[in-house]
Amino acid sequence: MKAHLTWRIELDIEQTDDESKATASIRLPDSTRLSSHGKSRRHPDDPVRTQVGEELATARALNGLAQRILRKAAHEIEQSTHQPAHPHP
C-alpha cells in the first residue's frame, strides 16, 4: 500500500537585536501536538545580524522537535514489541 502524507510544521520567531526565540510545533496524524523551543543570543562583540540569530534559534527548535518525535516513535515501538527501542536520527 502506498500513501502520501503531508505534515506541516508551524514555526514562530520572535526577535530583538540581541536575542531570537523560535517555537516549532506539529500536530501529528493521531492528533498529538508536539512543540519545542530554541533560542540564540548575540555576543556583545558580534555585529547585529538578526538573520543568523533566527537561523540558530530555528535550527535549535527544529532539532528539539525532531528529538520529541523520535522519543514518541520509540515509545510506540516499545508498547508494541515490549522491547527497548533505540531509533537513530
Image (tube, grey):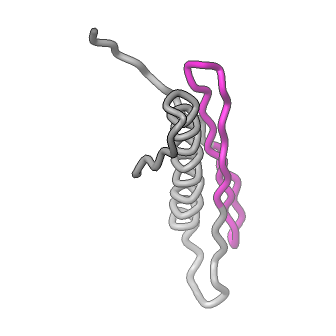
Q: Quadrant of residue 76?
A: top right
Question: What is the count of numbered marks?
Answer: 0
Residue 48 percent across, percent down from the top left: 59, 75
Residue at horizontal 69%, vertical 73%?
Answer: 18
Magenta span contains residue 9: no
Residue, far bottom: 45
Q: Nearer the viewer, residue 20 or 87?
A: 87
Which residues make up the magenta segment?
Answer: 12-38
Magenta span contains residue 36: yes
Residue at horizontal 52%, vertical 41%?
Answer: 74
Q: Nearer the viewer, residue 12 or 2?
A: 2
**Could you tell me which quadrant the N terminus lies in?**
top left
Q: Nearer the viewer, residue 43 or 70?
A: 70
Residue 55 percent across, percent down from the top left: 51, 60
Residue, far front: 82
Residue, far top: 1
Residue at horizontal 65%, vertical 53%?
Answer: 22
Relative side of 31 to 55, left or right = right
Q: Nearer the viewer, residue 38 or 74?
A: 74
Residue 35 percent across, percent down from the top left: 66, 42
Instruction: Using the image, determine if residue 28 lies above or below residue 57.
Output: above
Relative side of 24 to 89, left or right = right
Instruction: Using the image, determine if residue 19 lies above or below residue 60.
Output: below
Residue at horizontal 66%, vertical 73%?
Answer: 41
Residue 40 percent across, percent down from the top left: 63, 68
Residue, far left: 2
Helix, strand or loop for the magenta stretch, by majority: strand
Relative side of 66 to 32, left or right = left
